[in-house]
Structures are given as C-alpha cells and as structure tokens.
Amino acid sequence: MKENLHPKYEKTTITCACGNVIETASTKKNIRVEICSKCHPFFTGKQKLVDTSGRVDMFKKRYGLDK
C-alpha cells in the first residue's frame, strides 16, 4: 500500500453561529456552521411557517376559507 495517502484525522471543534461548540475528530480543522442541533427548528420544536409571498392568504381567499 502507498504511504502518506490518507489525510490526518485529528481532534477539531465545530462552532455554530448560535455559539454552540462541539468537539469531534475530522480531517479539517475548526469547522464553522450556520445551524446545529441546538438551534435547528426540527430539534427545538420551534418550527414556524414562513409565508413571504402571501400564498397561504391567496389560497384561503381563492377558496373562500378566510371567513
């Protein structure tokens, strides 16, 4: 087998935008992410409906459900 083929696998930290720090092992050093399990809506249960173009209101209006 060839030597020096595989990258080094060493301890690193993953830092989320919310401030959560996770220590793990990886081939990359100091990974930064935007969302993690502490702030993701699926894990926190604080999921919200995002309706920027008003599609829900248009649907309700079209089918008379806005009463």
Image: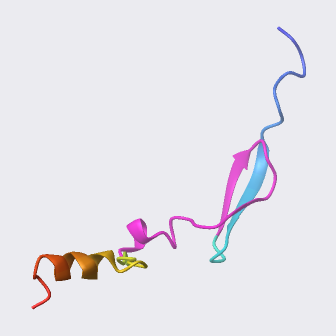
Quadrant location of the C terminus in the rendered image: bottom left
Q: How far across and how far down the image is residue 36, in percent?
A: 56, 65
Q: How far across and how far down the image is residue 19, in percent?
A: 66, 77
**Residue farthest to the bottom?**
67
Q: Residue at x 41, y 77 (%)?
A: 53
- Residue 55 on the magenta span: no
Q: Nearer the viewer, residue 4 or 49?
A: 49
Residue 21 lies in what quarter of the image? bottom right
Q: Residue at x 36, y 78 (%)?
A: 48
58 sits left or right of 35 in the view:
left
Q: Residue at x 71, y 47 (%)?
A: 25
**Residue farthest to the right?**
4
Q: How far across and how far down the image is residue 65, in percent?
A: 11, 82
- Residue 22 on the magenta span: yes
Quadrant location of the N terminus in the rendered image: top right
Residue 27 lies in what quarter of the image? top right
**Residue farthest to the top?**
1
Residue 56 lies in what quarter of the image? bottom left
Q: Nearer the viewer, residue 51 or 22?
A: 51
Task: Note whether 40 is above or below 2 in the view shown.
Answer: below
9 sits left or right of 23 in the view:
right
Task: Note whether 37 is above or below 49 in the view shown.
Answer: above
57 sits left or right of 22 in the view:
left
Q: Which residues are magenta?
A: 21-45
Q: How far across and how far down the image is residue 42, in percent?
A: 39, 66
